[in-house]
Amino acid sequence: MEERKNFIQEIVENDLAQNEKLSIVTRFPPEPNGYLHIGHAKAICVDFGIAQKYGGVCNLRMDDTNPAKEDTFYVDAIKRDVEWLGFQPAALCFAADYFETMFEQAIVLIKKGLAFVCDMNAEEIKETRGTLMEPGQESPYRNRSVEENLDLFRRMRAGEFPDGAKVLRAKINMASPNINLRDPILYRILRMEHYRTGNDWCIYPMYDYAHPIEDMMENVTHSICTLEFEDHRPLYDWVTANVDLPAKPRQIEFARLNMTRTIMSKRYLKKLVDENSVSGWDDPRMPTIAGLRRRGFTPEAIRDFCDRIGVAKSNSVVEAALLEHCVREDLAQKTERRMAVMDPIKLVIDNYPAGQSEVLQTENGSDEAHGTRGITFSRELFIQREDFMIDPPKKFFRLFVGGEVRLKSAYIVRCTGYETDENGVVTTVHCDYDPETKSGGAGAERKVKGTLHWVDAQNASPAEFRLYDYLLDEREGEGLDFSERVNPDSLIVKTGYIERALDTAAVGDSFQFIRVGYFRKDEDSAEIPVFNRIVGLRDSWAKQKQ
């Protein structure tokens, strides 16, 4: 079957056909002012994927032109996330390392009569920008001489003027139908220490000016970005055409990732962290790559998800259930099966010999390749509270007085009664077992409709289970603010028991807990182990596609 190419691949292949000597260079350029999220994962896969497919290279570049928000802490987090996703940058670059070149190229624009120093403040510039229906008004400082502009700009760098007193603007067209070309600001005065350059600079370039120069400095051939930059492309091309740098990259825009019940705003994610609404950037409820990693999502599943949603020219919303589907498919092949009971009640098999214990065999994974392992079984077990009901509805195929179930990999038991505490809460369920129905034995063919998992009380260890859900509730719509949609049940903590075999699990190990879901052992494990639910077993996305 012929490979289906996306429109970016078609552009790159056309460029290669016209220039066989072209060496493909792309870049992933996050601003180090927060953690990367699942939306960035798509961009990473596109940027690095194009380079890999066509024998090129992709740089990781910190777009650090705004000293107010950026920090080395975020640089380290970004590097860690990109490498964890499975990509190795050809080089680690910093926009700040090009500040001198950017300044020199601004001088070039001034000498060409294409940039001028403007004394208007931000509000005045905004008021004279015009509208989509009306042209803007030229600045009264637009026709300063080249000599005066050079003198003022150099004095701006020297720190002679206060913050906001002057800006450097491009001289393009105040009547342009594209507002981005109406003499945009290239530099502003800002006295603020930069995490990388310290106090060397008191003027900083604006993104729309800095970004194309960064691409040219790195010989980028295809500058791939999201659709919100489409209207900025004429300015990108204007800069590359008018500065004196040899490389001439082209900008290509694609649709960013939007996902149901998921926050894709770095600003709002930072607000959640700053207000302690979550435990940190790596809270497993967060859509950050760090949060997904801690929850137990795998890089293979995330890359598969990004591949499935594809690359498009128009925005759309992807079901979050698709990402979970990809995670389940990956974990089903990788994880071993164990038994864990949350919110437990005791099950006593009255006719099982007191003091007796036996080792039963159960499957270790999803297929024969995983083999089998031994689990202990005795008279007293723990089962899930939800697996017993005093007054069950019809088609309740779990335990109730008179009802029969099979205990996973063990025997069929019949409920004979139960005990409650002074509040009427069930504490213990009593059963009898049929010794002829041992799994794998001659009597195992006797069938019952329900099968329950369990943990042997004599070989159980206490554990904490953190059940994570989406940060946002199911309501969608532009009229709703994120703060109005916070899901109060995004984290539910339960305690229970795990089989003793899980005592040796390391932080980061993942398992399929039978009938419960996929779980990962968390870094908070101390006195007792803590397991994060990665995803449940029920696959809503797969059912939608049937």
Image (cartoon, helix red, strand yellow):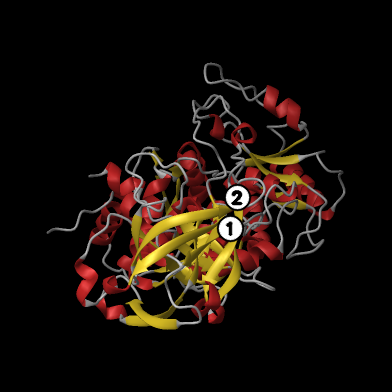
Please identify the quadrant where the C terminus is shown.
top left
Which image quadrant is residue 64 in?
Answer: bottom right
Question: Does residue 89 appear anywhere in the picture?
Answer: no
Q: Residue at x 55, y 43 (%)?
A: 263
- Packing grade of label 1 (10 A; few <14, some 14-19, many >=20) is many
Q: Name the disc covering residue 187, or none.
A: none
Amino acid carrying mark 2 in the image: Leu
Q: Pick whichever of labels 2 and 1 is earlier in the sequence.
A: 1
Q: Name the disc covering residue 466, or none.
A: 1
Residue closest to the eye, 486 or 447:
447
Q: Is residue 369 above or below residue 416?
A: below
Task: Read off the residue under disc 2.
Answer: 491
Question: Disc 2 on helix, strand or loop?
Answer: strand
Residue closest to the eye, 390 or 459:
390
The percent position of residue 187, horizontal first and vertical second, equals: 70, 46
Mark 2 vs 1: CB contact within 8 A: yes
Q: Residue furthest left?
A: 1
Q: Residue at x 74, y 32 (%)?
A: 122
Query: How many callouts does the rendering have?
Result: 2
The percent position of residue 7, horizontal first and vertical second, equals: 29, 48
Q: Residue at x 65, y 44 (%)?
A: 267
Please identify the quadrant where the N terminus is shown.
bottom left
Q: Is residue 120 above or below residue 374?
A: above
Q: Residue furthest top?
A: 133
Along the horizontal axis of the image, is 31 left or right of 372? right
The percent position of residue 379, horizontal first and vertical second, equals: 47, 73
Residue closest to the eye, 178 or 534:
534
Along the horizontal axis of the image, is 260 left or right of 483? left
Q: Residue at x 55, y 62 (%)?
A: 532
For the residues labelled 2 and 1, the Cα–Cα distance comes to 7 Å
